[in-house]
Amino acid sequence: MLNSGGPDRVNASRKPDTDTSVSGSPRKAPTGIVGFDHITRGGLPRGRTTLLLGGPGSGKTLFALEFLVHGLREMKEPGIFVAFEEHSKRIRANVESFGWNLPELEGKLSFVDAQPAADLIQSGDFDLGGMLAALQALIESTGARRIVFDALDVLLALLADPTARRTEIYRLHDWLLARELTAIITAKAAGDEISAIGREPLAFMQFMVDCGVTLNHKVVLGVSQRSLRVQKYRGTSFDENESPFIIGRRGFEVEVARPLERGSLEISDERVSSGVQRLDTMLDGGYYRGATIMIEGSPGTAKTTLCGAFAQAACKRRERTLFATFDSDANEVIRNLASVGIRLARYVKSGQLRMASVRITNGNAEIYFANILALAKEHKARCLVIDPVSAWHNPGDSMSANSVAERLINWSKAEGITLLCSSLLNETSTPPEGSTARQISTLADTSIHLSDVVQAGERNRGLSIIKSRGTDHSNQVRELILSDEGVTLADTYSLGGQVLMGTLRWQKESGEHAAAGMADAAEKLKRVKIEAEVAELEVQLRALGVELEAKRVEKALLARTNVERKSSLVTKHSRLDELRGADPGGARKKQDKP
């Protein structure tokens, strides 16, 4: 498809075409790549050319092909993929796992193989005229509006003369602008530098195109990291910082922090249970729905147990829940939690609970985050448990930790998902600065700390609430008790300013119970004695009452007898007077004289 020098060869002395061709902001062509369209405020410049640079394995071909597939499926814009390095058959085979179903797009998505033959011997000059003429015919037959030139640097390497390379770049650029095609040109780069093959013309091309994007793929302390940066975008604003990306199950995914708009969240006052009744009491009713909760503690402090209690409570409310465990196999978690009365197997069987287990050695937080989101969306989860999220942190991946944490929380809040994360702490340290766990702990609505308390040669578990935004909560340290009957919290018991737990607490409480029993017995004895004395006094009081009544009767009888005696005496005198015939009045008067 390559022609020897022809009459349409461009003058090598002309200046780069920097005309934007459209006044104001350029129109955008969505790429369909998750996150990238957010960075560029809508996609690539429509009707213009984008230069995509990246090292081996950075995802250049995948990015470009996904751009064409999305344009055809969603925008009804046919496309052409021109391959200069890898055969189109292999390219189609490589993307089968993404579910794009390229065979059904045949006729509207065209592949052109333009790889130089391995035994090609260059003789004389050549140009792109023949290839562009063939592409013109293909455009007219398919109506293509999008085009990709993949690995153009391979073709330019055939031109030994830098002037000839620049001339062909001008030719290609003018051809694309004249047809108003939305184009991507990919080329190799080593890090931030253009590869030795075609370094000069491609470096020059960065100044000529309207949009430049760089893909980076590096390994830091054994951890693979991929990032993307938009270097330039004429006529519009864009995010200039590096953004991490992954090659996931659906293809190219750029992870960006989308800040929540003010007033965009639906705030709920509804409470959801933690799965531990007494913890709900300490939290004044439980967690807020849609909140983020962080449970931190050293090994063996029952972080997974509290995660399991929350998951079980969510399933009892018939809420679909995803439990992602990074420390143990899912079946081990289910078995272990059953020993403390948390039985998750039935909910897994019913489909309400999905257990996802990932064993971690070295990993990328971006990959874990993307996989968790994909599983949560697939399961339609209302509650999400990550145990422990600290497993995501790796010294070689610390730069993206804050971004991952922010995006995780923003996503869960936007979706109304109640997010509970656990974090492993060393016994004498907090999460590493910049780690995912540290960032989530800072942004979390509720933070719970679990600790080991060693007293009298015994280790016990303590629980305290560090913060719980928007709600009253206890500031006490409670003993967390695990048994086959379930999980509970003991009442606070302090002595001399020290909170006692375990056997020491039991001994002190037993002593207090014994002392209280003795005091109660003494009180009862004293009560009986007093009651006996009262009864004795009541008997004496009743006897005195009887005696008093007898005296009163005797007194009344004596008074009546005296009255009767006097009355009888008067009667007798009157009768005698009558018998003597005497004057009763005179006789009486005589008697009355002294």
Image (cartoon, rainbow, N blue to C red):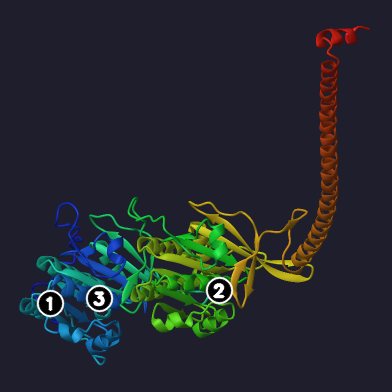
Q: Amino acid at mark 2?
A: Thr
Q: CA distance from mark 2 to mark 3?
A: 40 Å
Decide which of 122, 499 is in the foreground and name it: 499
In this rendering, the label closer to the viewer, 2 or 3: 2
Q: Is residue 167 above or below residue 85?
A: above
Quadrant, the N terminus: bottom left
Q: Amino acid at mark 3?
A: Glu
Q: Secondary structure at mark 3?
A: helix
Q: Is residue 366 above or below residue 93?
A: above
Q: Which mark is residue 132?
A: 1
The quadrant where residue 276 appears: bottom right
| Left or right position of 386 against 11 | right
| Left or right position of 389 against 457 | left
Mark 3 is surrounded, within 10 Å at the Cα level, by few (under 14), some (14 to 19) or many (20 or more) other residues, namely many
The quadrant where residue 7 appears: bottom left
Q: Which mark is residue 443?
A: none
Q: Secondary structure at mark 2?
A: helix
Q: Which mark is residue 66?
A: 3
What residue is disc 2 on? 304
* Residue 113 point in image, percent of width and height: 19, 86
Decide which of 392, 261 is in the foreground and name it: 261
| Left or right position of 336 against 378 | right
Q: CA distance from mark 2 to mark 1?
A: 62 Å
First of labels 2, 3 by sequence position: 3
* Residue 95 point in image, percent of width and height: 28, 84
